[in-house]
């Protein structure tokens, strides 16, 4: 949260409709995403009850467990789900391109990757748990399950883990994707309700966002997006339908009638959410894609390609817990990814950059003076170091000496030479730092440029900003940063529990109860 | 009966007070500054009924599937004199537990009255504390009692007080799963604060008979299903922090008397219909009475308080209704429209809000600049909430 998004929320409340907090779309949207709306039985850790799944908005596949506490039915459900999901995943594993990997080497990368879209963050938690409860299963021996079940478990676990990677789009929660682009007039907590959030963003004709969001809170008009069902529905509808299914066990005709009734009721709970997720995707698709979205999707494709290869070659399920070194490496990786994701978003989107302009980490303004031919004589060799002066009303908090880059001139770095709040003939005289944090007034910043101007002592045409150009400078960087070095797993220090036992799938994993 | 109690009884009307339980006492810690909740709880008003009478019922319900599962799990853990529980404490927590006896305090000679049961609990637990013998004893369904805001609240926990080597431990049985050693942190936090309520009540009970507080351990045993099975697992929870928080909040509630003093003399929230089945107090009258109890709504209330929708409705024009963080990011300005007017420069900041105003104006300028550059139509923020216009000067909102 920041003052900018808080203001957008206030404006949304006052206007009665959601306000944009992004000018471009920061998520990749697949041509053919797989929408997955799961429902779970209340009170259980991960007992699937029903799901609507598919890549065609007009023909969802409805899967239902008519006796959610029956282990065989549960695995039958997972096998059916695997049928849809695993074949969707594997559909992306056929066409690969070769990309450079170091000097003279290439590696394959699938030209496309899967994208699974769920309604909300809680559904991602369900994906994680369903993955956890199925990935260790065995397809032979006692308690054997269908061959696709453990494969599905591994894929689900992979997808859920990948969501921790900033900017990854392999598994998306609709509420989260929407919140990154719109501010509603309600609180973040209320935004977790997909129907209410969509009410603010896309209210039905004749309704304000506030009215639509209020209507969305009625579980009868607008069933919850899951995985938890509405307790009223559980008590008044679901319980008797499930009982009818149990009673009809053995009587084929009665059983199919009971199951059909249950399916109808559950479809009634799922269809509104199914439509909302597709509508959310439509709204997102209408936004212009951010410049770095494709690059991040390449990262997702790399990751997907890598895991598909691992699954094909080794295929061991993910361990229950990471070892110390693996966990530390992962955290380090996530931190660096977070920093570069934040920078990329700011470079792609003036509204995202405005967050940094608010805090003084970036500023934007017009070039009011330029000395494109200035040379630096201080060293042995003369160097071309043009000076420009930028005038801004942003609350600048950069210090003299800070190196910044302009969004539109990323090959060129600019060192802050002076900051002055008054009228400035600061171009030639090196003024000392003055208090530049005065927010409302005009601030003049003198910057010394280097790089991106050619090799000679006169700048290549167009390589130095001219008077009248509007520039936005920040100290953000999306550059590659070297990972921290960690010891190999077998040298894990005793402070971190010593070398971990290598993971070997155990029998107890495979036959674990699921009740 | 003290004056305060008489006033609270009058507020509630001629119905028995709704008893506190560990959940409601724990909830006191989540929004302690809310006078409305403090008074309603102290008076024992049925908040769910009140909210329904006001036309904005609480969005809470519990699925029977969850209740059934919770009960089944508890029964399983407690079956055969808590055999399963003892196994867990021995094997997983490594407690050297000798032979253990089991006492169920659920009913006293067929008399389930609360004061009787509490007396029985007190008698047995005090005797055990006095005896000083080393034998383990499990006390199931003890009925505890805690003073909340100057009133006694009976607590009927589904818990077991386990006495081992002269010390009492609280055992809390919950039906949310711990998967690979990790459970939902929100649920664990809720369980911890509820257990702390029981620890506190147990301590008070023993303190009354002159026993030291540390006779009740500040570590409680949490029992919940392991992974995806029904098999239980146990963990030790340290609730020292929760105890501190609770004690502080409960001591604050002693000020209930002062709050009540400040109320107009005739407020009444009687929800009982008269003999003809007509509500004695129409919704408008109830709302008028509630109006004098200042609420402190925040979105977190939606998860815990029965009055949440009603209070949210009343707080619509406030920045706090958009979340505490939003309020802070808007410079602590109370009303949404005030924040917008400050941002647009339509309102001059007064007393100490110049910084907030400058921040808001910068934010407004940056948003407009970006949206206009992207050729978005300038948004129209006025109009949909004319009736909720904020006070015109900042002084009145301070």
Image (tube, coloured by chain):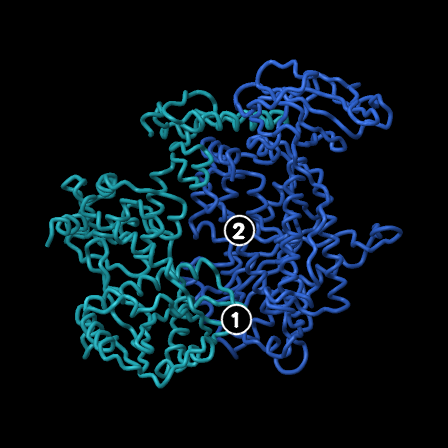
Chain colours: A blue, B cyan
Q: Is residue A270 visible?
A: yes
Q: Is residue A433 above or below residue B20?
A: above
| Residue, far bottom | B99
Q: Which residue is mark 1?
A: B228
x 70%, y 59%: residue = A88
- Marks 2, 1: nearer the viewer: 1
Q: Quadrant of the N terminus of chain B?
A: bottom left
Residue A228: image x %, image y %?
48, 59
Q: Which residue is mark 2?
A: A272
Q: Nearer the viewer, residue A305 or A42?
A: A305
Q: Is residue A303 left or right of residue A98?
A: left
Q: Is residue B381 above or below residue B68?
A: above
Residue A197: image x %, image y %?
51, 43
x 60%, y 64%: residue = A496
Q: Is residue A33 left or right of residue A62?
A: right
Q: Is residue A495 left or right of residue B112?
A: right
Chain letter for mark 2: A
Label 2 Cα neighbours within 10 Å, binned few <14 / some 14-19 / many ≥20: some
Please, what secondary structure does the residue beneath circle 2 have? helix
Corner quadrant of residue A293: top right
Q: Nearer the viewer, residue A434 or A279?
A: A434
Q: Nearer the viewer, residue B391 or B324?
A: B324
Q: Is residue A56 visible?
A: no
């Amino acid at each position: 949260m920041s003052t900018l998004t808080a203001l957008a929320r206030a404006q949304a409340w006052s206007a009665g409709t959601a306000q944009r907090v992004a000018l471009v779309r920061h998520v990749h949207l697949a041509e053919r995403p797989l929408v997955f709306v799961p429902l779970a039985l209340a009170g259980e850790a991960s007992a699937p009850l029903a799901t609507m799944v598919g890549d065609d908005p007009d023909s969802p596949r409805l899967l239902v467990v008519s006796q959610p506490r029956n282990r065989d039915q549960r695995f039958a459900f997972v096998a059916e789900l695997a049928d849809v999901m695993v074949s969707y995943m594997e559909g992306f594993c056929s066409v690969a391109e070769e990309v450079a990997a170091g000097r003279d080497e290439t590696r394959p990368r699938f030209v496309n990757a899967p994208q699974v879209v769920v309604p909300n963050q809680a559904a991602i938690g369900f994906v994680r748990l369903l993955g956890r409860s199925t990935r260790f299963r065995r397809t032979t021996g006692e308690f054997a399950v269908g061959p696709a079940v453990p494969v599905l478990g591994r894929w689900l676990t992979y997808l859920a883990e990948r969501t921790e990677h900033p900017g990854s789009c392999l598994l998306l929660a609709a509420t989260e994707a929407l919140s990154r682009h719109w501010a509603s007039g309600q609180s973040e907590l209320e935004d977790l309700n997909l129907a209410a959030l969509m009410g603010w963003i896309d209210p039905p004709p004749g309704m304000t966002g506030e009215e639509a969001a209020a209507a969305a809170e009625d579980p009868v008009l607008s069933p919850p997006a899951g995985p938890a069902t509405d307790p009223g529905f559980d008590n008044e509808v679901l319980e008797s339908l499930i009982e009818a299914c149990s009673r009809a066990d053995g009587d084929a005709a009665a059983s199919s009638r009971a199951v059909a009734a249950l399916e109808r009721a559950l479809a009634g709970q799922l269809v509104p959410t199914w439509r909302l997720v597709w509508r959310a995707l439509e709204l997102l698709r209408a936004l212009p894609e951010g410049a770095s979205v494709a690059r991040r999707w390449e990262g997702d494709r790399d990751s997907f390609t890598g895991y598909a290869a691992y699954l094909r070659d080794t295929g061991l399920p993910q361990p229950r817990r990471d070892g110390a070194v693996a966990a530390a490496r992962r955290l380090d990786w996530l931190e660096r990814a977070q920093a570069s994701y934040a920078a990329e978003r700011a470079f792609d989107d003036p509204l995202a950059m405005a967050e940094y302009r608010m805090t003084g980490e970036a500023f934007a303004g017009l070039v009011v003076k330029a000395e494109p031919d200035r040379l630096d004589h201080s060293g042995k060799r003369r160097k071309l170091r043009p000076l420009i002066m930028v005038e801004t009303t942003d609350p600048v908090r950069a210090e003299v000496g800070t190196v910044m880059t302009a969004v539109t001139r990323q090959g060129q770095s600019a060192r802050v030479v002076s900051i002055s709040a008054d009228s400035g003939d600061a171009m030639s005289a090196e003024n000392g730092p003055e208090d530049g944090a005065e927010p409302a007034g005009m601030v003049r910043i003198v910057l010394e440029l280097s790089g991106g101007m050619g090799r000679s002592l006169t700048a290549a045409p167009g390589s130095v900003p001219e008077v009248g150009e509007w520039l936005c400078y920040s100290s953000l960087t999306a550059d590659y940063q070297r990972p921290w070095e960690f010891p190999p797993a077998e040298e894990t220090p005793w402070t971190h529990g010593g070398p971990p036992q290598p993971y070997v799938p155990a029998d107890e994993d495979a036959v674990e109860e699921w009740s | 009966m003290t004056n305060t109690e008489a006033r609270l009884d009058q507020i509630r009307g001629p119905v028995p007070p709704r008893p506190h339980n560990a959940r409601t006492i724990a909830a006191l810690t989540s929004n302690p500054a809310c006078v409305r909740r403090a008074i309603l709880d102290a008076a024992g008003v049925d908040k769910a009924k009140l909210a329904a009478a006001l036309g904005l019922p609480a969005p809470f319900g519990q699925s029977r599937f969850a209740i059934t599962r919770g009960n089944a799990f508890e029964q399983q853990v407690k079956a055969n004199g808590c055999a399963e529980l003892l196994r867990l404490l021995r094997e997983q927590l490594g407690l050297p537990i000798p032979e253990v006896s089991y006492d169920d305090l659920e009913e006293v000679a067929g008399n389930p009255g609360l004061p009787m049961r509490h007396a029985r609990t007190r008698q047995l637990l005090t005797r055990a504390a006095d005896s000083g013998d080393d034998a383990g004893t499990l006390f199931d369904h003890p009925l505890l009692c805690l003073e909340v805001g100057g009133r006694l609240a009976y607590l009927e926990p589904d818990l077991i007080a386990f006495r081992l080597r002269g010390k009492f431990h609280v055992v809390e049985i919950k039906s949310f799963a711990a998967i690979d050693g990790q459970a939902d942190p929100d649920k664990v936090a809720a369980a911890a604060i509820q257990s702390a309520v029981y620890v506190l009540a147990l301590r008070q009970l023993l303190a009354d008979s002159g026993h030291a507080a540390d006779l009740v351990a500040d570590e409680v045993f949490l029992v919940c299903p392991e992974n995806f099975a029904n098999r239980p697992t146990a963990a030790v929870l340290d609730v020292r922090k929760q105890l501190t928080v609770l004690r502080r909040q409960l001591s604050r509630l002693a000020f209930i008397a002062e709050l009540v003093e400040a109320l107009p003399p005739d407020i009444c929230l009687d929800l009982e219909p008269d003999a003809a089945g007509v509500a004695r107090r129409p919704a408008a009258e109830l709302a008028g009475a509630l109006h004098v109890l200042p609420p402190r709504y925040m979105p977190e209330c939606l998860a815990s308080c029965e009055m949440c929708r009603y209070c949210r409705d009343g707080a619509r024009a406030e920045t706090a209704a958009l979340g505490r963080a939003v309020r802070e990011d808007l410079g602590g300005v109370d009303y949404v429209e005030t924040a917008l007017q400050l941002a647009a420069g339509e309102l001059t900041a007064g007393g100490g809000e110049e910084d907030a105003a400058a921040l808001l104006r910068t934010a407004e300028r940056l948003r407009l600049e970006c949206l206009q550059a992207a050729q978005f139509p300038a948004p129209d923020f006025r109009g949909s909430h004319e009736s909720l216009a904020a006070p015109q000067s900042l002084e009145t909102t301070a």
